[in-house]
Image: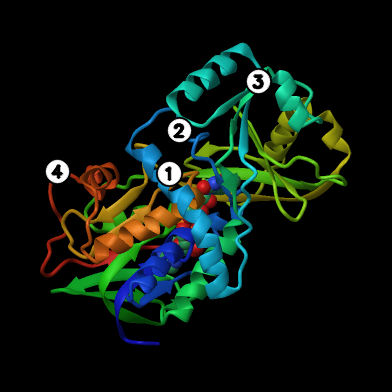
């Protein structure tokens, strides 16, 4: 292991690995430090939807960022395959957001007016595509949205960055960051490393690094549960999105069903009540799926934030310390654009002011600065 590196990234989920990938592609070798194995926290729990239009109701900078990130997946899929040999299983079959009552129908029809390229299907049109669905009053077909296999994306970013000279240290928890003049000292249980730049991409565990560097803790860890079934005849091709349920068909024939949502809950077990509730919602819409094989169930903790926006950018008072976190339920969708954005920031390339403002960590500044720039106090990350 090198003793001094240019960029250390704390956290090897999809966000940290994307940052590593885009920096490596620009010739900057990175070191990702991951306390478990790469991608095995929230990234692995994700359904992998690239839901630009299920996640937005109106135009704006955030919508454009989502759209740009989803669009990056098309070329990324080939690029990552040629660099890593890993297929990220990009599905381009589109998504259907479905209304089951008049109120939802009106909301979706308003959404159709807000964006170009969304097609309205009546109840018959929806059932033509998903014959197992018993009830729909209509829905929006979002042809450009799709899904990927999240762990494959993360692993492909990792392998591609390793191939370009970056390194990954797994099973190693960062306990502390100290900064003396312009150099960061990153301490683990059994040693440490120094770096010119640090990127905090610690997912739902990022809060302590904000507090340790004088900012308010912006994080709302939000537990989510899913289950998967393995239907004997997997005929649903499009991702189906309802107001309290989704069904994501995967290339291996599984349907992923999600998800519950509990704010300020970081527990890692899957509750029987949560899965029971999801099954009830599913079987009300698709009674025939009750006969299918149950494959698995799992839990993840979404890195939510207090104002609902990701936090991507340089610390307002500590130069060369960056955050890339808070992607809540859109981290897979936003990973490519986030990795590219952080890479542009670290390399002092042009970043649109609207993007910088939207995601800046400065919105969680306290009244006073506790972490000066020359000889900072120890930033203890805790456990
Ligand atoms: C049920 C569920 C369904 C979801 N579905 C979707 C979806 O369909 N589409 C979508 O876009 N998003 C979805 N998401 C959200 C998505 O999974 C997250 O936004 C994304 O995984 C966040 O990635 P991350 O890299 O920030 O976090 P993580 O994947 O959690 O990675 C952070 C990493 O940091 C490491 N770490 C933390 N602290 C330290 C430390 N001190 N030292 C070293 N390492 C540390 C952790 O071990 C972890 O591996 C879903 C989430 C859940 C829970």
Q: Please tell me whether mark 4 or mark 3 is closer to you in this view.
A: 3
Does 61 sit above or below residue 109?
below
> Residue 303: x, y in percent?
45, 48
Along the viewing direction, whichever of 214 and 260 lies nearer the viewer: 260
Look at mark 2 in the image and give the residue it sits on. Answer: 56
Q: Which residue is mark 4?
A: 367
The mark nearer the N terminus, 2 or 4, is 2
**Residue 88 visible, this orientation:** yes
For the residues carrying marks 2 and 4, which lies nearer the camera in this image? 2
Distance from Cα at disc 2 to Cα at disc 3: 19 Å
Please identify the residue farthest to the top as the structure is shown: 102
The earlier-in-sequence mark between 4 and 3 is 3
User: Pointer 2 and pointer 1: residues touching (CB < 8 Å)?
Assistant: yes
Along the line of sight, the residue nearer the viewer: 357 or 8: 357
> Residue 17: x percent and y percent?
45, 66
Quick one: SS at disc 2?
A: loop
Distance from Cα at disc 4 to Cα at disc 3: 50 Å
Mark 2 is surrounded, within 10 Å at the Cα level, by few (under 14), some (14 to 19) or many (20 or more) other residues, namely: some
Q: Residues within 10 Å of mark 3 (few under 14, many from 20)?
A: many
State whether residue 220 appears in this view: no
Judging from the image, what secondary structure is the residue with disc 4 in? loop
- In this picture the colour scheme is rainbow
Q: Which residue: 12% across, 64% down? A: 373
Q: Are marks 2 and 4 in contact (CB under 8 Å)?
A: no
Q: Is residue 72 above or below residue 32?
A: above
**For the view shown, which residue lies furthest in the front direction?**
117
Task: Look at mark 3 in the image and give the residue it sits on.
Answer: 138
Q: Position of residue 3 (x, y in %)?
A: 32, 86
| Residue position for label 1 | 66
């Amino acid at each position: 292991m090198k003793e001094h590196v240019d960029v250390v990234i704390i956290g090897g989920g999809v966000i940290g690995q994307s940052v590593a990938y885009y920096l490596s592609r620009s010739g900057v070798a990175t070191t990702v430090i991951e306390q478990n194995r790469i991608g095995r926290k929230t990234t692995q729990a994700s359904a992998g939807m690239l839901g630009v239009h299920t996640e937005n109701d109106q135009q704006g900078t955030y919508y454009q960022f989502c759209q740009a990130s989803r669009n990056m997946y098309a070329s990324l899929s080939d690029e990552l395959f040629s660099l890593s040999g890993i297929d990220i299983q990009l599905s381009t079959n589109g998504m259907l957001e479905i209304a089951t009552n008049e109120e939802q129908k009106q909301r979706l029809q308003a959404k159709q007016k807000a964006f170009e390229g969304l097609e309205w299907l009546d109840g018959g049109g929806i059932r033509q595509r998903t014959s197992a669905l018993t009830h729909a009053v209509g829905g929006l077909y979002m042809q450009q949205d799709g899904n990927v296999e999240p762990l494959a994306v993360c692993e492909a970013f990792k392998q591609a960055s390793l191939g370009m000279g970056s390194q990954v240290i797994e099973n190693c928890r960062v306990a502390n960051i100290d900064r003396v003049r312009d150099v960061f000292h990153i301490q683990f249980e059994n040693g440490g490393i120094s770096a010119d730049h640090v990127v905090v991409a610690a997912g739902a565990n990022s809060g302590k690094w904000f507090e340790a560097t004088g900012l308010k803790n912006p994080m709302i860890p939000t537990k989510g549960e899913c289950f998967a079934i393995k239907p004997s005849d997997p005929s649903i091709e499009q991702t189906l999105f309802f107001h309290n349920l989704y069904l994501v068909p995967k290339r291996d024939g599984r349907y992923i069903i999600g998800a519950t949502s509990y704010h300020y809950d970081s527990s890692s077990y899957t509750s029987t009540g949560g899965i029971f509730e999801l099954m009830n919602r599913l079987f009300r819409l698709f009674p025939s799926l009750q006969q299918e094989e149950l494959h698995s169930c799992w839990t993840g903790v979404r890195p939510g934030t207090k104002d609902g926006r990701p936090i991507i950018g340089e610390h307002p008072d500590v130069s060369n310390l960056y955050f890339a976190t808070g992607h809540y339920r859109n981290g897979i969708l936003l990973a490519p654009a986030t990795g590219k954005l952080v890479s542009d920031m670290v390399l002092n390339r042009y970043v649109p002011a609207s993007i910088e403002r939207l995601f800046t960590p400065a919105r969680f500044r306290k009244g006073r600065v506790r972490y000066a720039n020359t000889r900072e106090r120890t930033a203890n990350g805790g456990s």
